[in-house]
Image (cartoon, helix red, strand yellow):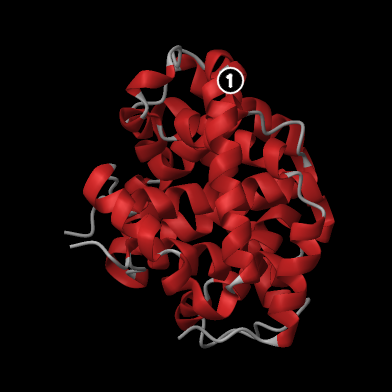
Amino acid sequence: MVLSGADKTNVKGVFAKIGGQAEDYGAETLERMFATYPQTKTYFPHFDLGKGSAQVKGHGKKVAAALVEAANHIDDIAGALSKLSDLHAQKLRVDPVNFKLLGQCFLVVVAVHNPSLLTPEVHASLDKFLCAVGNVLTAKYR
Amino acid sequence: MVHWTAEEKQLISSVWAKVNVEECGAEALARLLIVYPWTQRFFDNFGNLSSPTAIVGNPKVRAHGKKVLTSFGEAIKNLENLKATYSKLSELHCDKLHVDPENFRLLGDILIIVLAAHFGKDFTPSCQATWQKLVGVVAHALAHKYH
């Protein structure tokens, strides 16, 4: 799977449009992920996962920041997320299937708040980008 | 047997009541073919699928999308009995159409995105969770007769 020039432009466009709301999108992505895929909660036994949780908001901010970083360095996502990749491989060890679930929820959040932004072409590009991020984060697992 | 709470049934029917089956079905199928282009392998006889614009405008895609989502409507009427409802369709998809069941999951995910775009904030996390459960159960029922 390769991100074309058009894909990169589409992804950068999405994040430019989202702008400062990225943090809120991150929090809502997690909220939806925990509601839709309860098994993902197993990675957060130490969190209060109730509605409006400050911990979920804080973590959503981190997740969003990583996506923004990847989009800003879209020609070298592996380089940009290298430390995060190490962290996931050595410490967090989140099973690879879960990145797809997070990606699905992020797409839903974008769709909910910006339906006109998510044309089929942009949808495809963003889905590919999220896959690429997931691949980078799990690349050093074994 | 899948259990549906009263709340889940309400979330399903209230969303479904507002869905334009023809438009939504066409859009979901078009997006499947665009976002996951390898799914085009099942539609060699559909004519021009050479670009997103061609796919979105393709009348066979529209018609087939409507057909698929109309069938989904049958599932919603028969939530307590999905495997039986989809028994023949499952056999068809295995024996005649040779469709990998993974494609049902992909289409389900796409449908969720289309609903989210359509309903906006009304597509709450509970709504998403219920509908993600529904598409999963439909995909499972469609795969049930595979051998």
Q: Give the side of residue A1 with respect to residue B56, left or right.
A: left
Q: Is residue B100 left or right of residue A117?
A: left
> The C terminus of chain B is located in which quarter?
bottom left
Q: Give the x, y percent position of residue B22.
A: 69, 38
Q: Residue at x 29, y 57 (%)?
A: B91
Q: Chain of mark 1?
A: B
Position of A105 with respect to B24 (left or right) is left
Can residue A110 be seen in this snapshot? no
In the displayed structure image, the side of residue A4 where residue B74 appears, left or right: right
Identify which amino acid the numbered label 1 is placed on.
Pro
Q: Nearer the viewer, residue B109 or A81?
A: B109
Q: Which residue is mark 1?
A: B59
The structure residue drawn at horizontal position 49% and vertical position 28%, both measured from the top left corner, is B34
Position of residue B84 relative to residue A19, above or below, is: below
Q: Locate residue A83, reporting x and y percent.
A: 38, 52
Q: Secondary structure at mark 1?
A: helix
- Residue A37: x and y in percent read 52, 72
Q: As rendered, which of A47 and B120 lies closer to the eye?
A: B120
Question: Which residue is located at x 49 percent, y 14 percent?
Answer: B51
Locate the N terminus of chain B by quadrant: bottom left
Of all residues, the one furthest to the front in this rendering is B88
Check disc 1: other Cα within 10 Å, few if <14, some if 14-19, many if 20+.
some
Q: Would you identify the image quadrant in which residue A13 lies?
A: top right
In front of the other: A17 or B65: B65
For the point 56% across and 37% down, the residue is: B65
The percent coordinates of residue A7 (x first, y second) are 50, 23
